[in-house]
Image (cartoon, rainbow, N blue to C red):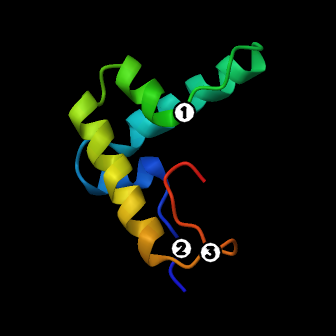
Amino acid sequence: MARQELFGEIAVRLGFVNRGQVDQALATQKHAQGSGQTHKLIGMHLLDAGALTSAQLIEVLREMERQRATVPTTTGRAGLLD
């Protein structure tokens, strides 16, 4: 069974960002969480950094949704907000 790709993996595969930008966004996310800030998804960090456009963020989310629709889940649901 194929595993679903992570947001950053898809964004890199689609050519929207490079691995360094994803690593930087992950470091920013980790630092923010360690500082007690509200959790923000990696896509939002990439958007805030100007690495992704809103259209690109939406396209990555659509790709994630397509993958979820084809990967069986243990709950039987395959929605974006599960």
Sequence-wise, the earlier of marks 1 and 3 is 1
Look at discs 1 and 3 and give the one toward the viewer: 3
Task: Give the labeled residue for mark 3.
Answer: 76
C-alpha span from label 1 to label 3: 24 Å
Q: Residue at x 69, y 71 (%)?
A: 75
**Observer-nearest of 58 and 24:** 58
Q: Is residue 35 left or right of residue 51?
A: right
Sequence-wise, the earlier of marks 2 and 1 is 2
Q: Residue at x 55, y 48 (%)?
A: 81
Task: Give the labeled residue for mark 1.
Answer: 41
Q: Disc 2 vs disc 1: Cβ atoms closer than 8 Å?
A: no
Task: Give the labeled residue for mark 2.
Answer: 3
Q: Position of residue 6 (x, y in %)?
A: 50, 55
Check disc 3 and report its element: helix, strand or loop: loop
Sequence-wise, the earlier of marks 2 and 3 is 2
Check disc 2 and report its element: helix, strand or loop: loop
**Observer-nearest of 63 and 12:** 63
Q: Is residue 37 left or right of residue 29?
A: right
C-alpha span from label 2 to label 3: 16 Å
Q: Position of residue 50 (x, y in %)?
A: 30, 20
Q: Position of residue 25 (x, y in %)?
A: 49, 30
Q: Disc 2 vs disc 3: Cβ atoms closer than 8 Å?
A: no
**What type is the residue that disc 3 sits on?**
Gly
**What type is the residue that disc 1 sits on?**
Leu
